[in-house]
Image: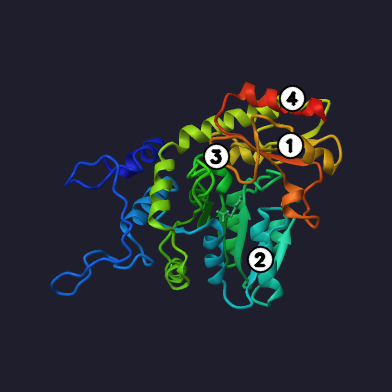
Amino acid sequence: MSNSRLRPETIAAHALKSTDESTGAVAPPIYPSSTYARDENYTPKLRENYIRNGNPTLWHAEDAIAALENGKGCLLFASGMAAITTLLETVPQGAHVVAPDVMYYGTRDWLKILEQRGRITLTLFDATQPGALEASIKSGKTDLVWIETPLNPTWDVIDIEAAAKAAHKAGAILAVDATATGAVTTKPLELDADIVFHSATKYLNGHSDVLAGALVTGALTQRWAEIATLRTKIGTPLAPFEAWLLTRGLRTVYLRYRQASANALAIAKHFERHPRIERVLYPGLASHRGHAIAAKQMTDGFGGMLSLLIKGSLEDARRFCTLLKVIVPATSLGGVETLAEHRKTVEGPQSPVPDNLVRISAGIEHADDLIADLEQALAKL
Ligand SMILES: Cc1ncc(COP(=O)(O)O)c(C=O)c1O
């Protein structure tokens, strides 16, 4: 049966299946070699013969991720930020970029640095305002519309189909940071996005032990070829061992993502009307302002990410994280273990994130243990 007829759960579960028929190995070998010999005609045996240009372990991981996102190609990078900065290198000098004002702060900071240097012009829009994205796009000037959905750490949801329509009408491309969707619950390329990005450090790997970034394209365009060339020129590809670990983690992404979604929903419901919680931000709750769009474009759960607005000060929210016993007070997301993080401490005082916001990345533990841990920490505040 060809891959195109398999369901995504099956594609993911078989992601590490070896193509090595000579040994019958069920898991593929890792190719750590930095260089590959030429044959008797001095022709490279593989399509690339130097590790920075590509290698078999990388291709294996890239093919699996491209299949999960229904893309025409995937490029893996040494980190999520390496993927983002390489993509941004393809924006023409002085061109206009549109992005949300609340999103992963590392991307926002880098966009602002590029703007300060005169490399790009930038409009940051308020994703909670209807029509703000469309109003920010300048026809003929905007080169790239960068969105993230759900948005970190408010988990507001951006309508990908509408964003793609607006970007394309103005001659821009739409790139979607879909890290929080785990390539499970939303398929941005099917909603007309041009490029999907994942910090593969998160759900795709899922075990908090790999740093990696992925770009997946819906079409093999000139722009895509330029990104691939830049990855080689700048030298930002993922190393073979990390690529192998990533493929290993990818096999269970559906199981992990669904359990994380179930846990996040259980936590969100439990604390939605809690005397010590001001508000729960989770797109799976009907009370969340992004719920209607989420229900439309998150087709396999609402994900494992939520935020709790604690009743109290910045110090209370930060102390709350230190009182947790099962949940780990650490940054990052998408791993098998639940993490809690006080975002303002991490992002700094200039961040638009509320002082009392604690971000939770639900893992795959039993929901009752997580809820009990959050309850005991709240009781001690
Ligand atoms: C939504 C989002 N995008 C991008 C990144 C950057 O990825 P990385 O840390 O793999 O460089 C992160 C990392 O936290 C993220 O959460």
Residue 292 on image: x %, y %: 66, 38
CB atoms of marks 2 and 1 within 8 Å:
no
Q: Which tag, 1 or 4, sits closer to the chain's start?
A: 1
Asked which quadrant contains residue 268, the reply is top right
Q: Report crowding for label 2: few under 14, some 14 to 19, many 20 or more residues within 10 A (C-alpha).
A: many
User: What amino acid type should be assigned to the residue bearing mark 1?
Assistant: Thr
Please identify the quadrant where the C terminus is shown. top right
Labels 1 and 4 touching (C-beta < 8 A) = no
- At label 3, which amino acid type do we have? Gly
Q: Residue at x 61, y 59 (%)?
A: 146
Calculate the distance from the C-alpha at mark 1 to the C-alpha at mark 4: 13 Å
Q: Which residue is mark 4?
A: 375
The tag on residue 111 is 2
The location of residue 294, given as percent across then percent down, is 63, 39
Apparent side of residue 243 relative to residue 314 in the rendered image (left or right)? left
Q: Residue 111 location in percent, x, y?
A: 66, 66
- Label 4: state its secondary structure: helix
Q: Earlier in the sequence, mark 4 or mark 2?
A: 2
Disc 4 marks a residue whose amino acid type is: Glu
Q: Could one spot residue 293 in this view of the protein?
A: yes
**Residue at x 16% of width, y 69% of height:** 39
- Pick out the residue farthest to the left: 40
Residue type pointed to by label 2: Leu
From the image, tell me which residue sits under label 3. Answer: 335
Indicate which disc residue 373 carries.
none
